Amino acid sequence: MQRLLRFLQDYHPIVHVLLLGTILARTASSMSMPFLAIYLSKQSHINPVLIGLIVGLGPLAATVGGFVGGALSDRLGRKTIMLFALSGWVVVFGGFAMVKSPLAFMLLNMLNGLCRSLYEPVSQALMADVTEREKRLKVFSLRYIAINVGVAVGPLLGAFFSTMEVWLPFMATGLIYLLYAIGLYVLLQRFGIKRIEGEKRSEITIKSSWNVVRADRVFRYYIGGSIMGAIGYAQMTVTLSQYVEQNVAGGAALFAMLMSLNAVVVVLFQVPLSRMFERWGPMIAITAGNVLFAVGDIGFAVSAGWFGFMVSMFFFTLGEILNYPQANVLVDQLAPEGMRGTYFGAQSFNNVGHFVGPLVGGVLLTHWGGPSLFTTMAVITLAGTWFYYRGQILYKMSLKSVETAQK
């Protein structure tokens, strides 16, 4: 009880609201999105390459949407952008439940990617707005735990609902997002979002934001590294689902277990691993994370049964734990005051990797098979580490030049 009271006192009520909302929202989306590739394959009989294209169009739309949404949130306020995104999700998942044509799925998934690119960076920026700098890594880690609490429950619920009607998980997801949008509006009003936004809003335009980000060489290297990582990570929910369904007995059930295992491992190991690597800094954590990603990919390549895939997912998830919250820390350190939303939004340029990943993965799975696909992804992920190191070298050089100029 004392830990709970300390947690409530240490962080702004808006952080608590967003963490709870993250659990609900990710439970909802995880009931449906991990099964989208299987759903498309069964309902529309689309080949793996076209499925990869449909799934990849969501991140492609997010590439532009995240930057624009983040920049607009610095200017117009966080609440407006987040509520717009949640309303769009209601339309997306209701549409997924009803449409049949590949074109309709493409358009809806593009809207889905746009909504995610608007909501995710803006919610992260708002959490950072109301949290002291030294506590932000813990907030990003708690947010990641919240995401994975939802992801742990969602796939199992999705598998259960889909036994009744294949469209039911999508409709239920849309309803949950509607309830979340209403609840978030009420709670943000209650906890003083107008005052926060009044203090934090910037007069910077989208054009000037783009010019700042474009000129930031450190940020470009960070994005390069995250794009490489995203190409590999995208296989987990697209080609992996198709691969296990086609090659392992009870593949759909195994994939649901893998998704839940991924989330459970994050919930159990996020805090201890973050504390372990906190004294070594973000770069060591990201490097170790990429190595563990590669170990997981090699495991997927050589596994033939449930046990092998689950062990591989365990290592893959440890890489995820170390990589993603620390990447957010790098962006937070780099972002100028008043442009946090812009930088977190521009971080969604890594969705280029989430677009390319499913498309390339579909081609490799079709023509080369799963082992070659996942081995290739291990190499790509490891290569992405160089971009982070190059960016970190430039960042330290810029800090030294500033210190020299101030003396």
Image (cartoon, rainbow, N blue to C red):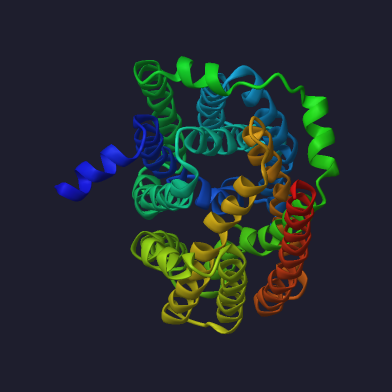
> Image height check: is 266 above or below 42?
below
Residue 226, image quadrant: bottom right
| Residue 105 at least partly seen | no
Q: Residue at x 49, y 63 (%)?
A: 321
Residue 76 vs 68, above or below: the answer is above
Pick whichever, 389 or 372, lies toward us: 389
* Residue 247 position within the rendered picture, expressed as x and y whole percent measured from the top left: 55, 74
Question: Residue at the spot x=78%, y=54% of the render?
Answer: 404
Find the residue positioned furthest to the front. Answer: 407
Question: Image check: 286 left or right of 10?
Answer: right
Residue 118 image-quadrant placement = top right
Give the residue displayed 37% in from the left and 55% down from the top.
152
Residue 78 visible within the image: yes
Tell me where residue 329 appears, x and y as whole percent. Answer: 57, 52
Residue 16 picture location, percent across and down: 34, 36
Residue 378 in the image: above or below residue 267: below
Splitting the image into 4 quarters, where does residue 112 fall? top right
